[in-house]
Amino acid sequence: MPAFNFSIGNMINIILIAAGIGICGMIILQVNSGTQLRKEVTRYFRLFFSIVILYIGSHLVRMLLEGQPGPVVHYALYGVTLLEFLASGAMAFLFSGLTLFIAAPEKDQNRRYTMLFIGTLALHAVLMIVSQFISLCYYFDADNIYHRGPGYLFSNLAHVIMLGGDVVLLIRYRNKFSDRIRPAFWNYIIAPLAAILIQAFFRDVQFIILATVAAAVYMSMVIMRDQMLKYEKQQAVTNRLSTELNMATAIQASQLPRLFPAFPNRPEFDVYASMKPAKEVGGDFYDFFLVDNDHIGLVMADVSGKGVPAALFMMVARVLIKAHLQNGESPAVALENVNNQLCESNEAELFVTVWTGVLEISTGKGVAANAGHEHPAIRRANGEYALQVYRHSPAVATMDGIPFREHSFQLNPGDSLFVYTDGVAEATNANNELFGNDRMLDALNVHPDAQPEEVLSNVMKGIDAFVAGAEQFDDITMLCLKYNGPAASGEQA
């Protein structure tokens, strides 16, 4: 068996190919560990450099087998050469795809370029397979020596077409390419062409491989660097927004009563409330405050929407409702005035459902208005919680000039009132099932005579057990008041 040709040219080629395979392997490892890269970028360069390794690796195998005798070697040479040419076409196609992705032309243009590149790759594959049988682009003689065929130029036809398309994209959509990326793309196009010219004078050395690997590595480094810079900027924005959201959360929380016991010097009643926002800031709110020495105002509300816009609207609505109730207005009149004020400049078209009531502490008599909100639950002394269902008024801020209904209710000593937002009943588990009012009442009645804080804790435990870790989609807000004052005759709330 003839020995391998240890010429200077072949040794240089082996060194270039080995170095190229090693560099491409390191790039793949770097890409795989690049947590700051987009998934699309990671997948692309992983595939691209795998194809590059296949291209130069098959060329190395052809070098090592060339000139070795035997039919098995003959067929193996044709196989690895076909693989080499197909890999080179795939490299050109992947580069064209990347160029098209960054250029992002109009939909029709995108379709045309896509069809052009796919058709060109298919044509290249057909020509290379045909060449296996008719020696169109290359062939091996009886001594298994590689020769270019009469149609060798056809082996580069696909590359010329795709590179031509890339040049058009780079020129036509040059503004889509950043100042860092644009030179790297031009370098990838020009470097192999320059290597072909150089190789015309130094046939023994495969400068095309050196140029291809070097240009590909440079291009990948520039794109990955560009991606990392974008990631760092996004992280800076994310960190800033996170800080601002944390501040918004703290501000929102500070606006709601959260020191308990809230009225330690008022033994006539106990009150407790909680809010668990679905996002950093929520649209739900609760409130309780003394209107005067003998009246306590209660508010439970839910703004449409979520996040910062709902939170801002919530803060405005809360201040207005509290101000009107503390001015001595009844719940219905207060909601009517708040509704007209919010409708004046409601460009975001948000609205808020509200249950609000004023309880006379000395007698347990109360007046409430319900603007599209959930039905409250009342527990009579020695009884269980039950929903108090009645007709609602429209939500606040839906239409100006509308009146709101109100009704009277009575709390006797030992009675409790529970109000909440729809995030309680609509808590959802992994099977897309709702917690519902029945489960809520079951949780309330685990220990119906409990103090308000324990009542809310029991409901929250029931929700947590039901959703079993599923994502929370809505704010969960609850308020419970237990009336301990003088006994009085009761009416339904």
Image (tube, rainbow, N blue to C red):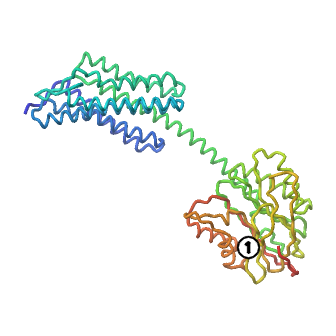
Viewer-side residue, 430 vs 116: 116
Q: In the image, what residue type sits under mark 1? A: Pro
Say which quadrant the C terminus sits in. Answer: bottom right
x, y percentage for residue 240? Answer: 63, 44
- Residue 232 lies in what quarter of the image? top right
Residue 152 visible to an observer of this rendering: yes
x, y percentage for residue 193? Answer: 34, 20
In the rendered image, the vertical position of residue 92 relative to residue 331, given as above or below = above
Residue shown at 60% from the left, 44% from the top: 238
Q: Is residue 480 left or right of residue 37?
A: right
In the rendered image, the vertical position of residue 453 relative to residue 37, given as above or below = below
Task: State the residue lying farthest toward the left.
Answer: 1
Q: Residues within 10 Å of mark 1 (few under 14, many from 20)?
A: many
**How many dots with numbers?**
1
Q: Which residue is mark 1?
A: 452
Residue shown at 60% from the left, 68% from the top: 464
Residue shown at 21% from the left, 31% from the top: 132
Q: Is residue 471 left or right of residue 347?
A: left
In the rendered image, the vertical position of residue 231 relative to residue 145, given as above or below = below
Task: State the residue lying farthest toward the bottom.
Answer: 382
Mark 1 lies on a secondary structure that is: helix
- Residue 219 lies in what quarter of the image? top left
- Residue 192 lies in what quarter of the image? top left
